[in-house]
Amino acid sequence: MSHDPLLQPYQLKHLTLRNRIIVTAHEPAYPEDGMPKERYRAYTVERAKGGVAMTMTAGSAAVSKDSPPVFNNLLAYKDEIVPWIREMTDAVHEEGAAIMIQLTHLGRRTRWDKGEWLPVVAPSHHREASHRAFPKKIEDWDIERILKDFADAAERMKAGGMDGVELEAYGHLIDQFASPLTNELDGPYGGSLDNRMRFCFDVLKAIRMRVGGDFILGVRYTADECLPGGTGKEEGFEISKRLKESGLIDYLNVIRGHIDTDAGLTDVIPIQGMANSPHLDFAGEIRAATNFPTFHAAKIPDVATARHAIASGKVDMVGMTRAHMTDPHIVRKIIEKREDDIRPCVGANYCLDRIYQGGAAYCIHNAATGRELTMPHTIAKADRRKKVVIVGAGPAGLEAARVAGERGHDVVVFEAANDPGGQIRLTAQSERRREMISIIDWRMSQCEKLGVTFHFNTWAEADTIESEKPDVVIIATGGLPHTEILSEGNELVVSAWDIISGDVKPGNNVLIFDDAGDHAGLQAAEFLANAGAKVEIMTPDRAFAPEVMAMNLVPYMRSLQKLDVTFTVTYRLESVEKSGNQLIAYVGSDYGGVSKQRTLDQVVVNHGTIPLDELYFELKPISNNLGEISHDQLIAGEPQSVVRNPDGKFQLFRIGDAVAARNTHAAIYDALRLLKDV
């Protein structure tokens, strides 16, 4: 038997968990009509196949109609959810894992114009900054109704075969009752801690009455809001002890912080560039103070940290949730002593930022996550070995090489630069984005194991490719910055890449015109401001940096606001002219009627990339598909069968930014869905 602390079983009431790693509750936003149908089930089951002890689904499932999801959550208030839950729980149990679900009433953490357009309810009229709804102060009949809703939902989950239910308290209605910042009720539910905790205990009692004593019940709650006037550490410890002593629950799932603002949420769930496991020691203090089963998850991305969490006794079960979105087979690889093969979570938070922006969760560098019905996590061997030639060793090219290598093909990669990485190597030069380089390092390591041949410092020409006698050619040459966007003065501007790479010296008074809205604009601004420049970021959009999204924006804002960077929205840079040793920038607006000027010494443009596609078009006439991709086959995850030139020498595809400026995930998805069937 293994002596690895992570692989030891754990007894939770009647349930024996096969190891110490869990996937904590999260909502990947895959439901259809509020139900966990095939896609949701396939995603959940994949983690069970990978060996996790328990997966918790839904973050969180809504128990009431006046708790409408602000993104695509499960609807636990509908009876029709039971058979869908049963199909999912049966499939997870067949793989040897346990499964629980998280239930909630969002309280003020939602909007009145979602779902059935019912008023938002909370124990005060205080609006939550993130969701902006002014709530109705909850009434006695609301409380009675919601208590019944919780019990009804828990009974549905038990009927659906769940091993237990976790209540989502932190930031949601239960926590809004508990916190003195958000509870302005008079007794019996307001005022003293006894009264503020009454709603939580009433919910727990209502559920226990309905599901009995054997059903596992836990609470994910904040034991320190880290807010003046809120639930502090001392009161949080008292809440923890009371939860244990109630006899109503079976474990604590500890959180520290608040989620009512983007900044607060990002401190609770840190992203890349922020410290790993920042709340683990705090969770350990709760466990020590209560001597009660304690779970915790918050940026625990690697096996070493998870192992320490268990070995040191800080927690009983460690959550590696985003890490399992990146690699659902972490536990299996630990068991097989293949930890080096674990695909690393780089903390890019593309998953959560997409959810909070109303999209489905996708991992920035595992395109199979959330697409289990059409994309494989494990690549099958091909029936016939082929010669695959790839041009470009950025994320698209390296994913193509990895997948083709896993297929068993003879793979050759040509790269013009000294090192692999493309735009990721550039973006990783910024300290806050340095974890991104793991996307490249992991693929290079996998490619080396698979015997992929690399030629660096090699500019591939058409005859270079032809001499390899390939069966398949992949053009993954990426793009170059597009700065030719002004009516005049294009020769006077520099790109964001020029600044980030250090190829161009920072100016003193700088305008960044950013209508790409991605990381490059903010990275350039931070680089310039740290160098002492006065910086203004301008965009024609209603908001700046929309592609960066909410949680990733937080660290940038903390830095750039301290550096006194100015943000200007709804204005467009139209032209630039030279005036002595200065530049005159002419500014207009898409809304019309505006003409302004700026006197500067440097203008930076961030406007995406233009594809480096000359080689593709040179090879296109001698390919058998003439570069064509069947979109129907691509979407369905089927092999490409287009033949437009029967005399052609090879299949030809281009992927990533060699097609059009997109992002890392798109580049990797291009490669996976094309190469998995080559």
Image (cartoon, grey):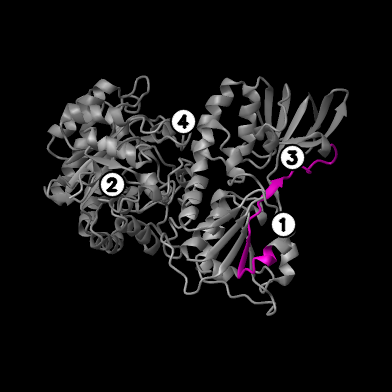
Residue that badge 4 annotates:
263
Foreground of the two, 414 or 528: 414
Dominant secondary structure of the magenta stretch? loop
Segment tinted magenta in the rendering: 465-489
Q: Residue at x 68, y 27 (%)?
A: 536
Q: Nearer the viewer, mark 4 or mark 2?
A: 2
Q: Residue at x 68, y 41 (%)?
A: 515
- Which three-letter amino acid code belongs to the residue tagged 4? Ala
Question: Which mark sits nearer the N-terminus, 3 or 1?
Answer: 3
Tag shown at residue 613: 1
Residue that badge 2 annotates:
22
The residues bearing labels 4 and 3 have C-alpha atoms spaced at a distance of 31 Å
Question: Which mark sits nearer the N-terminus, 1 or 4?
Answer: 4
Question: Which mark sits nearer the N-terminus, 4 or 2?
Answer: 2
Under circle 3, the secondary element is loop
Tag shown at residue 591: 3
Q: Nearer the viewer, mark 1 or mark 4?
A: 1
**Residue 484 colored magenta?**
yes
Q: Nearer the viewer, mark 4 or mark 3?
A: 4
The residues bearing labels 1 and 4 have C-alpha atoms spaced at a distance of 41 Å
Residue 521 in picture, x, y percent from top left: 64, 36
Residue 118 in picture, x, y percent from top left: 40, 46
- Which three-letter amino acid code belongs to the residue tagged 1? Asp
